[in-house]
């Protein structure tokens, strides 16, 4: 069957040159109301660091104008930017990690300032570095006015349920911080299946690992005012939720008297690369509509993919508004003005 994009293109062409608008004209006249909570930026200093410090080489090409062009084309009013994986943590060089994190956060804050209303910022920290993280939380939220904090699913061999991260979580909880979590390639599984890169399987699985550990360890319960936002419709969690229910039934953790589902339901999830009908249906069996947001994963994906996924699922207009804008405004009230 032809894709939704092809059908729409063909239908527009059939209207005739006199009545139809060109694609650029449509992009310029389309209302920009969507809020993209999964949108990457690549500060030059981060691109340079990735070129020398990660095996995959340089991250994808990016400029502010590239983001703005994509946002205009896809009807996106505001994009909350976050770094590409694996962010800024280098266990063998903590001073470099701190310096790089600070420079990336200042670049992001300048991006927000230079393009009023178009960008927001999830500032980067590195939880294995407790002292550096606490200082950067204060600077990013109080001075740079970041909209939240961005984390990776894992750091070296530690997932987000690791007890060593508690001092960081205590501060994030005190501030009622919005914490966005993006997957990365786990140390365990960089070359498990020949011909299939880690991004195809392991990213979604790493999200499930870190969500599961946060809940089963008790840290999500202990720090209930952190507002967790997870990528890619929760990865494989909606399909594996029953296994966590069974695990809780067997172990009977005191902090989960009703099992893990209440915790899973109160987290937030965005739909980038998690927007096929089956993925959306599974997520909505686990969480209410009030926990679901819009995300593109730009520049790895474009807005057309998520827009088509939302349209194909058949949401009613109220649910579309909720996903594409209203839940984000609830989490970041300043976006109401965009």
Image (tube, helix red, strand yellow):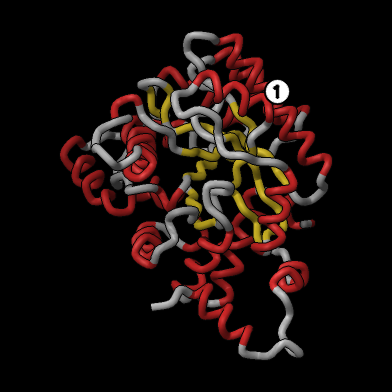
Observer able to see residue 167: no
Q: In the rendered image, which residue does mark 1 sit on? A: 103
Q: Is mark 1 on a helix, strand or loop?
A: helix
Front-most of 47 and 239? 47
Front-most of 328 and 247? 328
- Disc 1 residue crowd, few under 14, some 14–19, many 20+, Cα 10 Å: some
Front-most of 299 and 156? 299
Q: Which image quadrant: the N terminus?
A: bottom left
Position of 313 with respect to 254 (left or right) is right
Question: Who's the residue at 62% across and 49% down the image?
Answer: 331
Q: In this view, does 161 lie above or below 317?
A: above
Q: How many marks?
A: 1
Residue 132 drawn at (x, y percent): 60, 15
Residue 135 drawn at (x, y percent): 66, 17
Q: In this view, does 109 lie above or below 259?
A: above
Residue 83 drawn at (x, y percent): 59, 34
Question: Who's the residue at 81% across and 46% down the image?
Answer: 115
Q: Is residue 47 above or below residue 128?
A: below
Q: Place residue 256 in its image quadrant.
A: top left
Front-most of 24 and 143? 24
Position of 20 with respect to 183 (left or right) is right
Q: Is residue 5 above or below residue 280?
A: below
Position of 138 with respect to 173 (left or right) is right
Observer able to see residue 260: yes
Position of 243 with respect to 285 (left or right) is left
Question: Who's the residue at 79% across and 56% down the image?
Answer: 337
Question: Who's the residue at 25% across and 44% down the image?
Answer: 244
Residue 63 drawn at (x, y percent): 70, 41
């Amino acid at each position: 069957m032809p894709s939704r994009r092809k059908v729409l293109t063909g239908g527009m062409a059939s209207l005739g040159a006199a009545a139809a608008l060109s694609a650029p004209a449509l992009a310029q006249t389309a209302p920009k109301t969507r809020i993209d909570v999964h949108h990457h930026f690549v500060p030059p200093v981060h691109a340079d660091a990735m070129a020398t410090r990660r095996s995959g080489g340089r991250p994808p090409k990016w400029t502010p104008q590239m983001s703005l062009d994509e946002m205009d084309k896809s009807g996106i009013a505001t994009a909350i930017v976050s770094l590409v994986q694996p962010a800024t943590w280098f266990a063998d060089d903590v001073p470099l990690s701190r310096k790089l994190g600070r420079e990336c956060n200042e670049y992001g804050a300048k991006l927000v300032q230079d393009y009023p209303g178009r960008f927001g910022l999830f500032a980067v920290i590195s939880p294995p570095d407790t002292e550096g993280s606490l200082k950067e939380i204060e600077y990013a939220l109080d001075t740079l006015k970041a909209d939240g904090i961005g984390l990776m699913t894992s750091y070296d061999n530690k997932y987000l349920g690791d007890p060593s991260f508690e001092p960081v979580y205590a501060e994030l909880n005190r501030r009622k911080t919005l914490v966005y979590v993006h997957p990365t390639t786990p140390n365990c599984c960089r070359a498990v299946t020949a011909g299939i890169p880690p991004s195809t399987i392991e990213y979604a699985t790493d999200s499930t690992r870190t969500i599961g550990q946060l809940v089963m360890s008790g840290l999500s319960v202990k720090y209930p005012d952190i507002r967790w936002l997870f990528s890619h419709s929760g990865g494989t969690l909606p399909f594996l939720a029953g296994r966590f229910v069974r695990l809780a039934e067997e172990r009977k953790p005191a902090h989960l008297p009703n099992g893990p589902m209440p915790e899973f339901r109160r987290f937030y999830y965005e739909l980038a690369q998690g927007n096929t009908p089956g993925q959306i249906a599974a997520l909505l069996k686990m969480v209410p509509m009030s926990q679901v947001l819009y995300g593109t994963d730009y520049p790895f994906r474009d807005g057309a993919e998520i827009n088509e996924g939302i349209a194909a699922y058949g949401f009613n207009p109220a649910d579309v508004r909720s996903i594409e804008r209203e839940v984000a405004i609830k989490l970041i009230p300043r976006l109401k003005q965009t």
